[in-house]
Image: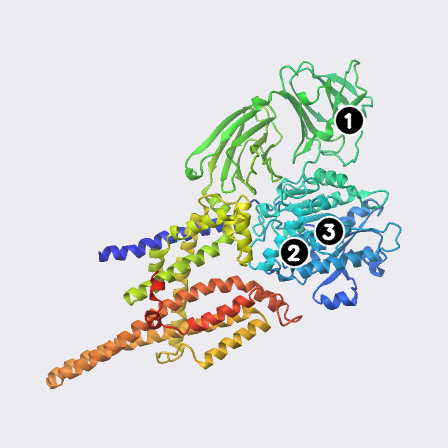
Amino acid sequence: MGRAGRRLPALAALFYGALAALVLLGVREVLLVYEENRCSMTYMYEYPEYLKIKLPKKTARRYPAYELYLYGEGNYAKENKNLLLTGIPVLFLPGNAGSYKQVRSLGSIALRKAEDVDFKYHFNFFSVNFNEELVALYGGSLQRQTKFVHECIKVILKLYKDREFAPSSVAIVGHSMGGLVARALLTLKNFKPELINLLITQATPHVAPVMPLDRYLTDFYTSVNNHWILKAQELRNLTTLSVAGGFRDYQVRSGLAFLPRSSQHDSALSVVSSAVPRAWASTDHLSIVWCKELILATIRAFFDLIDENTRQITEDPKKRMSVLNHHFVRHPAKIFEENPEAFTELIGTFTWITVKASKWTYSVYNDSDGKYFTFPLASHRKSYSHVHCESTLLDTSSWIFGCMNRNSPMCLEATDLSWKAELLPTTKVVMLKLQDHPSLSHIVVRVPPTVGNKYTLECEFFEEDSRTVQLPVTHLFSFGLSSSKILLNSTGLLYNVQLQHFNRIYQAFKIYIESHCQSLKERKPSVYRLHIPWSHEDSIIVAKIPSSTEISAKLHSAQPQNDNRVPELNIYSSSDCQYEVILKTSLLQVLGQIIRFHAGALPAYIVSNILLAYGGQLSTLVSTGQCSDFSLELVRTAKPYKIEPLISIVVFLQGFNWFREIWESLSLPEVDAAVLSSQDAWFPLVSLILFLFGTGIAYWSGVFFSASLRLFSSLWLTLMRPPVLQKDKLITPRRLCGALSLALVSWTTCGALAVVIVYLQYLFKVIKLHVNVKAEQNMLNGDSGCSKETSQDSRIHTVKNQSSVDSISEATQSFSNSTIAEAVNSLKMHVTILNLFTWIVLLNLPSLIYWLKNLRYSVKLDPDPCRSTAIIITCILEILMNSSSSEVKSSRHKSIIKL
């Protein structure tokens, strides 16, 4: 029995160590394991300058910490010092702890682009200084930032007053929380929606806050998202683009950056940077503002949005969406045209060549004669369903056309099919379904004269079923031990591998593609694209042939309901090559997905585990008179069935409006499980997994906390003389004054400051108690040794006094043992309470940091999410830190504690 009892803590430590290790592996997967940075840095050609814009006195007094700047470089900056502006205004809003200087990448690239067109059009980039506030962690200043931006827009438009092409609206680019502030403008009562016509957000968490640390933050999100859903029809004139960073951005997961689906289907667009044409790169949370490939796409879109008549951004919402789709979704490798001509004349002294084969390849090198290759469709319609063509010449000229009723040797007028092409990293491709073009008689591919250029064109006709392969994904619990495998003996240019049953965010796989070719001739690289049909989150990889390539397959957003489309792996292959595709479940990436989507809920599970252990300690103390260790009570009491049914019931009831209304009327916080369930990010076992992870973290945090206290007490004993162990009264006038003082601090300055002060006071008291207990134990051990020696001496000299000495020694030792036992019980209880409040302090720290940073502007934090909570916590801790185990045992509420 004793041996089994000793094994239990060791097995528990091993089990909880394994759980903590799984959490650390998941965190490592999120923070460290992702694709390499494929973004290029943007550089300024001249020294950047930021001209401070003078604000109205009333605005400056109301918002002393905020400023407005105009970006410039070199001569352009000198010309704008008098603020005689003639360009198109764009306002940049930085995000959480962001700097107004982050506008320089956009401003510099836009200036270079304007020089290319001899300043026929140019943009004036303004930037707001929000004093680098931590608005992602403290929501109290979001409304103030929103109102300041409204004032800035009015100031900016006044700068263009009486100009020939004066703007009536401002385009906004918002990074991180700056994008949310821009959306919040439309919730202001006096704001006119026509003041904004274009909004581009970069890595902005639109759906929900990354960490809902205070109610001001969650209320702000609720207000903004509800307004955009209810007023969707009124916001059709505002075009919104949200660009997410992909898996490199571990601060804001891309699923949060997707605009709510129910709002503005035809005037809002959400993309992941890895799917943006000519970028094809995931970005981290900061690099998204300077990633050259993304900045170029943004500036190209800005210039294509200009209306030649007004010299401002077009007022046509359809054109704005067309431009954004052109640059951010599907780029046809052509310069944007609003209304391309329906028919094109095929002119020039080109040679016409008819190709009747179903598969055709043509390599061009220093070809001085232009050619038109024509493919008659009549002979192919019966046998094939699609035609696919590729060109490695990545210019912007038209190259593929469709002829109708061609009877003569030449097709003089044709439909330009180049607009249906798609640009990929090494090639441009077009695929046509023959059934969708019944009027076409021929496909024509143009090969212009080339000098010094070497490229290849390929076309093939095929049946869709012959190029589509289904690959069932492996089960989640296969743990990578089993795999799905297919072998493709490539005879064509394109294969679509459908990944069956891949639709949940917790699924994660590694796909290995081995390519082998029969001949060793030089071949164009293969392109592998993981295509997610329900959102623009594709990822593209270019691989040499032959090669072995590894692809990570995981989702940013789950498959919506009533959407039966299947993710695909598109393989743009080389003919006469063999491709082996192997798919395995990746346990590490599954852990990473759980942490990525649910890490915000972990603190609640950790605290619930600590509370269960503390309840077990109180129960044991009342029933046995001894307070057990935190780790032992955690093993005994941390059972999922005590938490899981309650969570399931609340999540179920949250689906009813009446329950949500009651919940909100009680000012209760949103349930993490309910929020994630509404985002399609909740699955049946996640709550159990999070509970176990929370138990593991609570166990080892308790071990670490106890070890730290022992270390501090040892240092204290080394440096200072320990005080005498004595029992204090629970409530004294001095403690009442201390509690009132902390309540006053909370009310007049910052609630989190009062919480931290009382926490440090409690920590000092626990360390002091630990020192006392250790000193008393050392003294008791020393006295016990002395009494034994005295007893032996007495036996030699006087037998008569032996009984009296032993009785006094035993009484003294008994009294000391009982006092130390009570102190040890109190110490165990206090360590658990301090461990619990450590997590509470950590969750309150953001508002304290915000208050310290803005202390020069205001002594009082307003609004303060911790004020009322801090008053309650300080009163509770003042009582708890002076309580002892004997008072708990003598409590009148024993029945409640036992229950």
From what the image shows, is residue 226 above or below residue 889? above
Q: Amino acid at mark 3?
A: Ile
From what the image shows, is residue 835 above or below residue 485? below
Between marks 1 and 2, how big is the CA–CA gap? 50 Å
Which of the pair 548/82 is nearer the observer? 82
Which of the pair 250/144 is nearer the observer? 144
Residue 457 visible here:
yes
- Circle 3 or circle 1, nearest the eye: 3
Position in image of residue 280 (x %, y %): 63, 41
Between marks 2 and 3, how big is the CA–CA gap? 13 Å
Q: Which residue is mark 1?
A: 449
Position in image of residue 820 (x %, y %): 30, 74
Residue at disc 3, secondary structure: strand
Q: Amino acid at mark 1?
A: Pro
Q: Earlier in the sequence, mark 1 or mark 2?
A: 2
Residue at disc 1, secondary structure: loop
Asked if marks 1 and 2 touch (Cβ < 8 Å), the reply is no
Q: Which residue is mark 2?
A: 95
**Image quadrant in which you'd find residue 308:** top right
**Numbered label attached to residue 193:** none
Asked if marks 2 and 3 touch (Cβ < 8 Å), the reply is no
Q: Amino acid at mark 2?
A: Gly
In which quadrant of the rendered image does the N terminus lie?
bottom left
